[in-house]
Each structure stands twice: as structure tokens, then as C-alpha cells.
Image (cartoon, rainbow, N blue to C red):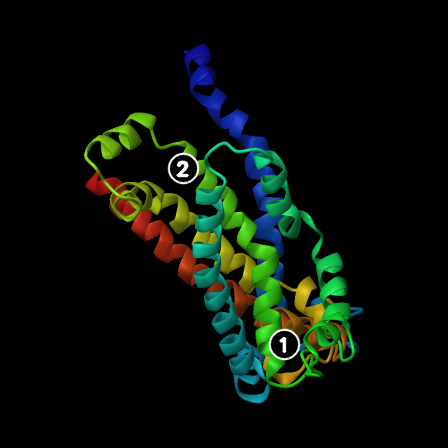
Amino acid sequence: MSKAVSRRQRPLWMLAPGGVLMVAVIVVPLAVALLVSTLDLNQYTLRQWTDAPGVGLANYVEAWRETALPHAIWVTVGYAVIVTVLAVPLGLAAALATQQRFAGRALVRSAFLIPYVLPAFVVGTVWRTILQPGGPLGHATGTDYLWLNGPRSYWALVAVQLWTSWPLLYLLALSGLQGIPDDVHEAAALDGAGWWEKLRSIILPHLRGVLGLGMVIEFLHTLNSFTLPYVLFGVPAPHDVEVLPVLTYVESFQNFKFGLSAAMAVLSLVLVAIPLSVYLRAVKLNTDED
């Protein structure tokens, strides 16, 4: 009897290390963040943070009413949507262009991945040099626009984030294209299907799941991007590019309002959970239909 019980419990013991790691890496930090968000924690009470006075939901109310949080959410979500929408056709077009064999295909594929594999700090530093007044872009175009401040800074952030992000959609689309059977393409060719008809009726339906996953990952990655806007614009960031991760950093490590910044971080988590839950719901519905 004891041997039978131990055999039934063996899978649970095998899952135990992963469960302990998940609790240590995810559950405990999340619980601490939730606790800190309800405390009046600043540079004066940080030394004995467990004795900091509780303020309930006051930090959340202050974050929404007395800080630039609503504006930061609007800017962050807006530019994340734009980057995601533009990255899909770019990645798909690049994948279609490099699907067939040709001389130098491996070199082209490697070149397409350079923006994605470069560290965000390097990307931000290089583009900050390019976009600064009197920089290479100004000399090449004969203009002297302020790309790192003012209204144009928003589109500079979109362009740089798009440049560094679209190869992810390219990789996913390329892997999806390689999963389409050759006989499907042959049957379409025998039926006389043109390029547009093959794209609309064969390629896009096969890539729907892959591109959907890629869009969610792209959106969440852009939503949580801190290093690139931080290096590109510095702090305090211009009003037009005051994104949520940088605002949270400023409240925590410049204004030393740790409870307030924790409340912003929790709200950021809620913001991330919305598109993720929508995607998981859509995947579940597709699975049930199949």
C-alpha cells in the first residue's frame, strides 16, 4: 500500500522544485509589492520598512490623481500598439522574402536579426547619437529637427522601438512558414492560385496562431520596455515620451516614494494582464472549436 502511494506521489515530488522556484521568483516578490503599495514607504521609513505606516489604497489614489500616471499609460499603450501593428507586416514581408533559397540567404537572415540581438543599452546609445541635433541624421537630411525633445520625440521612440522589435515577428513568421507542408503550395499552384490568393487563403490562415502569439509578445515587450527610452531620452523624460516604466523608476529612485512606485508597478501588472488574458481566452476558444 505504501509503495502504491509513493508511486502516485512521485510526480508531485518531481514538480516540487519548479513549484518552489515559482513561489520564490513570482509569488513572494508579488506579495511584497502588494504589501509595499499599501505602505507610506519613503527614504525616511525604508530602514524599518516593516514598521512603515499603512495607508491602504491611498498610494493608488495618489498615483492616479496627483501624478502623470494616466498620461504615461496613454503614451505607453499608444506607442506599444503602433509598434506592434507595424511590426507584423514588416516581419511577415521579411519572412516571405527570405523563405525561398537564394545566394546569400543566410547572410540576409543574420542581418535581419542584428537589431533584435543588440542590447537595448547599445541601441539607445547609437540612436541617441544619430538623432541628436547636428547628428548624422540631421547632416544626411539637411534638417535640424529636435527628435529627442518635443512632439517629434514620440515618433522617434516609435521608430527606434520598431527597429529593434520587428525581427521577433520575422522569426516567428519564418518558423510558421516552414511549417506549411509543400504539398499545400503545390496544390495551390496546380489550381492556378496567384500570389495574393496564396497569401490570403493559405499563408495567413496557417500563420494566424503564430502571428497572434507574436503580437502579444511584441505588445508586452514594448509595454514593459525601460532601458531603451531611459537611455534614449534620459530622465526626466520629455512629456511626450513619459512611459510608464520610466515614470515608475523616477518615483522610486529619484523621488524616493517607494510605496507610490509599488502601486504604479501593481497597476502596470494589471495593464499587462489584460491583453494576456484576452489572448489566452482566444486560444482556448480556438482549441474548443477544434
Numbered circle sitting on residue 260: 1
Q: Answer yes or no: is residue 38 visible.
A: no
Residue under pointer 2: 177
Where the N terminus falls, by quadrant? top left
Q: Is residue 29 above or below residue 137?
A: above
Q: Position of residue 172 (x, y in %)?
A: 47, 43
- Quarter of the image holding residue 257? bottom right
Mark 1: secondary structure: helix
Q: Position of residue 139 (x, y in %)?
A: 75, 75
Furthest-bottom residue in this view: 66
Residues at circles 1 and 2 in contact by the CB criterion of under 8 Å? no
Disc 1 packing (10 Å; few <14; some 14–19; many ≥20)? many
Instruction: Compare marks 1 and 2 and give the one earlier in the sequence.
Output: 2
Q: Nearer the viewer, mark 1 or mark 2?
A: 2
Q: Specify whether 60 is left or right of 128.
A: left
Residue situated in front as seen by the camera: 133 or 179? 133
Q: CA distance from mark 1 to mark 2?
A: 46 Å
Q: Position of residue 68 (x, y in %)?
A: 58, 84
Q: Is residue 256 above or below residue 212?
A: below
Disc 2 packing (10 Å; few <14; some 14–19; many ≥20)? some
- Quarter of the image holding residue 182? top left
Q: Is residue 177 above or below residue 221?
A: above
